[in-house]
Image: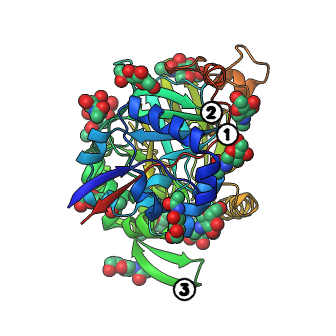
Amino acid sequence: MKLLPLYLLAVATAAVAQNATFLDGLMSTLENAGATSLTQIASQLNGTSQGQYLLNSISNGDAYVLFAPNDTAVSNAPSNLTSSPADLFAYHVVHGNFSGQSTTYPNTTVGRTFLNDTTWVSLEGNKSQVVAWATRSDGNVHVLNQRNDSTITNVTTYGNLTIYIVSSVLEWPDNFSGTVNADAPYLDGLSELVSNVSQTFYNGSDGTTSNETVSRILDYGFKGFTLFAPNTTAIEAIGSSITTYEQNATLMQIILSNHIINGTSVYSPELVGKSYISAAGQTFSFHINSTGQYVTMGSVTARILQPDVLLSNGVAHVIDQVLLDTEENTGAASSAYMCRVASATSAAGQSTTETRAIGYSQTEGLASGSGSSASSTSSHSAGVAVRGPSAGQMAALGFTAVGVVVGGFLAMA
Ligand SMILES: *[C@@H]1O[C@H](CO)[C@@H](O)[C@H](O)[C@H]1NC(C)=O
Ligand SMILES: *[C@@H]1O[C@H](CO)[C@@H](O)[C@H](O)[C@H]1NC(C)=O
Ligand SMILES: *[C@@H]1O[C@H](CO)[C@@H](O)[C@H](O)[C@H]1NC(C)=O
Ligand SMILES: *[C@@H]1O[C@H](CO)[C@@H](O)[C@H](O)[C@H]1NC(C)=O
Ligand SMILES: *[C@@H]1O[C@H](CO)[C@@H](O)[C@H](O)[C@H]1NC(C)=O
Ligand SMILES: *[C@@H]1O[C@H](CO)[C@@H](O)[C@H](O)[C@H]1NC(C)=O
Ligand SMILES: *[C@@H]1O[C@H](CO)[C@@H](O)[C@H](O)[C@H]1NC(C)=O
Ligand SMILES: *[C@@H]1O[C@H](CO)[C@@H](O)[C@H](O)[C@H]1NC(C)=O
Ligand SMILES: *[C@@H]1O[C@H](CO)[C@@H](O)[C@H](O)[C@H]1NC(C)=O
Ligand SMILES: *[C@@H]1O[C@H](CO)[C@@H](O)[C@H](O)[C@H]1NC(C)=O
Ligand SMILES: *[C@@H]1O[C@H](CO)[C@@H](O)[C@H](O)[C@H]1NC(C)=O
Ligand SMILES: CC(=O)N[C@H]1CO[C@H](CO)[C@@H](O)[C@@H]1O
């Protein structure tokens, strides 16, 4: 199997002719950046309604970010990733202008992609999957949660499109078990624990009730959830008491449910200054300072060691302590859930209309010392983290049109 990159295509033949100069310019932009275009396979993406939707969207005049794997990245990509060009491309496009957004890990920038294929994504309100990135201590901007570390190696713009050249094709998230197996061995302890606890599971979508392991519920039962995931050391630290808890399945379920927000995927920038109700009805609260981000439940405050481990149906934040709370309040849990479902439903369809980093207000990070307490506790470093010509410079060069750019990858037999 030989992998061929494809980067350019147009919505229709007429549009190609009409915007030939624009497309030529874009093609050379990508070529100069090491991302070669192969227009002859463009029709493969154009051949799906999902691909067409994507093309129409990104030519609508708004700002978009394209993560563009360079040619080496594409030739090194696992073949299963490249077998679905429309899905692959959808996960590489984010709606919005992120040029004022700069975060240093463990703070992260989270953007909503276009990937909403139900084969891969099961988030609340049918939202599309997100991608997270941040500057790490090596000074490079890393796309997080990637099996093959992907860094932004160059940045360029073309009209309203910001192109981040990346060193690997971006893989979209797997479910909890798959993620632990492949990428998060430090969660083996939790993974084992949730495999040993069963719970009566009410499946809201078909109204059936079944007895499932919590592991299976995490993998398939939630449509949007947030998991505070103690690493294996944290689980070992509570020692033999875990065995005692395990002997009482009800108690163990409550403890596990107090690590979960049921029905919504809350990314780390959205935790700041908020509180949430757990799946067992207890309250999570959060604070952030220069030493990190913390979650508190009852008498336990845990540090978030690794934020935003993205999952196909939610998100996990790795923490350094078990949130050992054995209290439950089922009424509070279910009303909080109903409230989230209502808000996810009203937000449905907004997945690709989010035009800024999730959890940041429009101007946040661009102005210092803003007034509200929520933003003053969450203001992140401002600044343009990227090199390359600005939109203004591009305009000066004559690239003022709002354009169509599409890349994708195709496995050719
Ligand atoms: C970054 O891309 C620009 C064109 O967009 C190119 O001129 C420059 O050589 C690239 N830099 C690197 C380090 O690849
Ligand atoms: C792609 O990026 C990687 C990492 O920076 C680099 O080693 C490789 O040479 C680049 N390939 C191309 C074709 O530019
Ligand atoms: C889009 O698809 C149609 C039908 O599959 C094809 O005729 C057309 O050439 C394609 N357009 C481009 C730009 O690839
Ligand atoms: C698109 O680019 C044009 C020209 O640079 C600019 O006037 C317009 O505001 C941009 N639109 C968005 C949504 O950024
Ligand atoms: C691709 O294959 C790898 C290894 O088998 C697997 O972990 C990953 O989930 C697969 N990804 C997709 C999108 O199928
Ligand atoms: C994915 O998003 C597109 C555009 O909003 C929408 O038409 C389509 O129905 C969505 N698919 C799913 C499975 O929600
Ligand atoms: C869990 O986190 C603690 C605190 O950072 C660390 O010392 C420990 O090595 C981690 N455990 C695992 C299994 O990664
Ligand atoms: C659920 O299944 C487990 C494992 O088979 C079993 O131990 C437990 O008693 C069952 N619980 C209920 C409520 O049926
Ligand atoms: C198990 O824990 C639940 C919840 O704390 C408690 O109500 C119940 O009495 C416990 N059962 C046993 C056998 O200790
Ligand atoms: C993360 O953001 C918080 C709140 O704005 C800030 O106090 C902290 O210094 C930031 N951390 C890093 C590593 O930039
Ligand atoms: C999530 O909340 C709904 C509604 O209260 C409930 O039916 C479902 O069992 C909950 N899921 C879990 C795993 O707690
Ligand atoms: C598909 C596409 O990009 N169409 C654009 C072609 O150029 C004109 C004028 O610059 C735009 O209005 C179209 O949106």
**Quick check: marks 3 and 1 in contact, CB under 8 Å?**
no
Please tell me in which quarter of the rendered image ligand 4 is found: top right
Residue 118 location (% of width, % of height): 50, 68
Residue 69 location (% of width, % of height): 37, 40
**Quick check: marks 1 and 2 in contact, CB under 8 Å?**
yes
**Quick check: marks 3 and 2 in contact, CB under 8 Å?**
no
Residue type (three-letter) at the residue carrying disc 2: Gly
Ligand 4 closer than 8 Å to the CB at disc 2?
Answer: yes
Q: Nearer the viewer, mark 3 or mark 2?
A: 2
Query: Label 2, on which residue?
Result: 159
**Residue 74 against residue 257 in the figure, above or below:** above
Query: Which structural element holds mark 3?
Result: strand
Q: In the image, what residue occupies the spot 53% across and 35% down? A: 25
Query: Which structural element holds mark 1?
Result: loop
Query: Label 3, on which residue?
Result: 208
Separation of residues labelled 3 and 1 (CA atoms): 49 Å
Q: In the image, what residue occupies the spot 67% across and 39% down? A: 402
**Residue 30 against residue 382 in the figure, above or below:** below
Residue type (three-letter) at the residue carrying disc 1: Val
Q: In the image, what residue occupies the spot 57% across and 52% down? A: 265
Query: Label 1, on which residue?
Result: 402
Q: Is residue 60 visible?
A: no
